[in-house]
Image: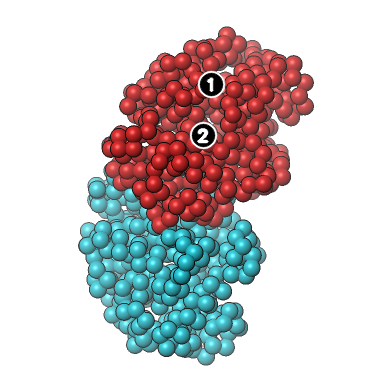
Chain colours: A red, B cyan
Amino acid sequence: MTNVYVAGAAVHPFGKHKDMTTTDLGVSAAAMLLAETGVSPESIDAGFVGSVYGGSLVAQRILQRVGVSGQPVFTIENACASGGSAVHLGWQAIAAGTYDAVLVVGVESLSQFGGGTLPLSTADIEIDQGVVMPATYAMRAQRYLYETGATVSDLTNVSVKNRGNGSLNPRAHLRTAVTSAEVDESRPIADPFRLFHCCPNSDGAAAILLCSEDFAKQLGTPAVRMRASVVLSGQFHTSFRDMTWPDITERAVSAAYKMSGIAPTDLDIVELHDAFAVAEFLHAEAIGIAERGTAYRAVANGDFALDGRVAVSPSGGLLSRGHPLGATGVSQIAESYWQLIGEAGPLQVAGAQVALTHTTGGGIFGVDNGACSVHILTAEI
Amino acid sequence: MTNVYVAGAAVHPFGKHKDMTTTDLGVSAAAMLLAETGVSPESIDAGFVGSVYGGSLVAQRILQRVGVSGQPVFTIENACASGGSAVHLGWQAIAAGTYDAVLVVGVESLSQFGGGTLPLSTADIEIDQGVVMPATYAMRAQRYLYETGATVSDLTNVSVKNRGNGSLNPRAHLRTAVTSAEVDESRPIADPFRLFHCCPNSDGAAAILLCSEDFAKQLGTPAVRMRASVVLSGQFHTSFRDMTWPDITERAVSAAYKMSGIAPTDLDIVELHDAFAVAEFLHAEAIGIAERGTAYRAVANGDFALDGRVAVSPSGGLLSRGHPLGATGVSQIAESYWQLIGEAGPLQVAGAQVALTHTTGGGIFGVDNGACSVHILTAEI
C-alpha cells in the first residue's frame, strides 16, 4: 500500500443557499481547491463526489465545470456517510497505486426540499410511522440519561460548546454562540431535545485533494497523511439493540486504529457526527476518548474543549457547522487538514498532530444500521 | 495487479414489475447469485450497487436482506453506466488486492415513475426544451443516414435482429421477435424512430460475483477472467461535435484494448448500448468491429448475427432485453459470463471465447458527455 496524503482543502461555507444549485455549490468548492493548490484539472486522475440528493451525474455536472472532463468520475451515496465514502474510495485507489491524484467533493442542497426532517423518504415503515431522525436520537438520549444519570443540562453543554466553536468558524452555518438558557428556551423538537440540541439542515460543499507521496512532493502544498480510511455498514438484526452503544462506530474506529497503529489516547482532535447533542456522548465513548457512560462528564469538565484533553468538533460540529449530508464527511477532513497544518485560525488547537473524523448515517432499519466512515490523519507525513 | 474473475451471475428477468420495489428486485438477483454459487454472505468483503433512482442506502437495503450485513457497501451512480461503474470499482479493489470477493448488484425500477422518457430530471435546459434521449438519438440517426447512405430499413434491421435474439432469452423484457413490417408500422416516436427502434423502460436487477484467483479456485464455480475494466466521462466542449462519432466509446474501448492486449478482431461477442437502433451502428464502429460508416452493412450482411463474424447483443440488447438503467451494465456481464462458460442455452454463440460489454449514459451536456463503461472478459482464465 502506498501512503495517501491530503494536499489541499476547500469549503463553500455551509448555510442556506437557496440561490445556488447542488452543482453551483460543488463547483464553488472544487474551483477554490484547484485555485488554492494550483493543481491543473488535467492532472486529476479521477473524481469521487459524495451526495445523497444531488441527482444523476452530479459528479460530472460539477467536475466538468472546473475542467475535470474525460476522466473516470463517480457519484457515491451512503446517506450521511456519502462524503466519507467518496473519500474512502479515492483513498483506496491511491493506496492501491491505481491513481496518483483524486479530487473528492462532498455536496448537498437541502434547501431545495423546503424543510422538514430527515430522512426525506418515507420508503420505510418506521419513517412512515414517525421514527424520523430526531425521534430516534431522542429515544437514545432518554435512555442515555436514564442509564448514566446525566441530565438535559449535560446535553445543553454540548450545544453550548459546539456553538461556541462554530462562532469562530467562518464556514459554519450557525455562527453565533449560545448560552445554556438560550438552548433550554429554544422550541421543543422531540423530548428531551430543544431546537438547539439538533443540527440544522444545511446547504454546502467541501473538496479535498487526495494524492500519492510523489504527487504531494511535486505539488509542494502543505500535506497531511491519511493513516486510516474505513467504511462499514450496520449489522442488521431484529433482536435487542442497546440504543446507547453505537456499535457501527465502535467497529469502524477499531478497524481504523488497527490500520494506523494509532490509539484513542493519541488523538488531539475528533470531528464526530453530533447530529443531535447526545450523539457526542455516544460516539465519543465508542471512539474511546471517554469511558462508557462518562462522556457527559468529560464535556462538563472541559475535556473536549478547544484547549481540553482532546478537542471534540473544534469546527463547531454538525450542531454549529451544519449538516449538508454529502458535504459533512469531506468538510470534517478539510477542517482537520487546516488544524494539522496549523492554519485553522481562531479555531486552531495548539500543537494538533493527530485527528480522527467520523460520520454515521442511516439507521432506517433500526439504530445504527446504515453506514459509518472513519478517517485518521496525522501532521507527521 | 491481481487477476479478477467473474465466478457467478444472476438476473431477475427484466420487464414491468410494478409489484416489486427496487429493493425487492435487487434482493431477488443477489439471493439467486448466492444460492447458485454457494457463497456465504459472510465471505463477501464488500458490496457495490449501481442504481440511478434507487434512493438513499439502496445498497444496504438490498444487501442486508441477503445477509451481507456489516461490510463496506456503496451505492454508485453514473447514469446508464451506473452498473458498469459499480463493477469497475469492485474490479479495481480486487485488482489492487484490497478485497477477495465483491458482490455487485445493478438494479432499477422505472415503473415507479409511471412512464415517460429519460432523463426524468428537467434540471438541464436542454431537457427542459425537449432534447430528451429519443430526440438526441434521432438527430444522430438522421445524420448517420445522411452521411452513410443507410436508410430507415437499416435501422429496422437492428431491431429485427436484436428482438430475434431476445425472443430466445428468458430474461429479456420483450420476448417476441418482430418483422420489419411490424417495426416500421409501430408508432412514430422521433423521426426516423418508430417505437420498436427504441428500448423499453424496464424494471430489473442483475448480480455478479467478482473475486480473486484464490477465491475463484476455492469456490470452484465456472469462472471467466475480467481482462479490462474502464470507466470514463465525456469530454465537455461547446464547439463542433460530430454526432455520428461517440468519442467517449472510442476512448474507453481504446483504454480497454490497451489494458487487456485484446484487439477488436479477437471479439466473439459484443453487448453494446443499443438504447436506440442507430446506437448499434455508432458504437460498433467506435468499438472497431466495423469500419466507420459501414456498420449498417455489417448488420444487413448478418455479420453481427448469433452465428455471424461477431455476435452483437446476443442477449437481445437494450432493444429487447430492456433497459433498467443501473441493471443494464451488470446484466451485460452476466449474459457474457453465461456465454463464455457455455451455458447460454438457446442464445449460445458457438465457441465464444472473448466478450466485450459497453454502456454509455448521460449526454445531457451535449452528445456523449456523461459516462461510459467497458469490460472485456475471456473464457481463458
Residue A136 at least partly seen: no
Q: Is residue A328 above or below residue B28?
A: above
Q: Is residue B144 above or below residue A305?
A: below
Q: Helix, strand, or loop for circle 2?
A: helix
Identify which residue, B157 or A330, lies in the foreground.
Answer: A330
Q: In what quadrant of the picture does the C terminus of chain A appear?
A: top left
Residue B129 at least partly seen: yes
The residue sitting at 57% across, 53% down in the picture is: A55
Q: Helix, strand, or loop for circle 1?
A: helix
Q: CA distance from mark 1 to mark 2?
A: 14 Å
Q: Earlier in the sequence, mark 1 or mark 2?
A: 2
Q: Residues within 10 Å of mark 2 (few under 14, many from 20)?
A: many
Percent from the top left, x then y, of residue A97? 29, 43
The residue sitting at 35% across, 67% down in the picture is: B250
Percent from the top left, x then y, of residue B217? 24, 51
Q: Report in which chain the residue with disc 2 lies.
A: A
Q: Identify the amino acid type marked 2.
A: Ser
Q: Is residue A170 above or below residue A301?
A: below
Percent from the top left, x then y, of residue B314? 38, 74
In this view, the residue farthest toward the top is: A301
Q: Which mark is residue A182?
A: none
Q: Is residue B154 above or below residue B327?
A: below
> What residue does disc 1 label?
A347
Q: Residues within 10 Å of mark 1 (few under 14, many from 20)?
A: many
Q: Image quarter for residue A296?
A: top right
Q: Report in which chain the residue with disc 1 lies.
A: A
In this view, the residue farthest toward the bottom is: B181
> What residue does disc 2 label?
A331
Q: Identify the amino acid type marked 1.
A: Leu
The residue sitting at 30% across, 34% down in the picture is: A217
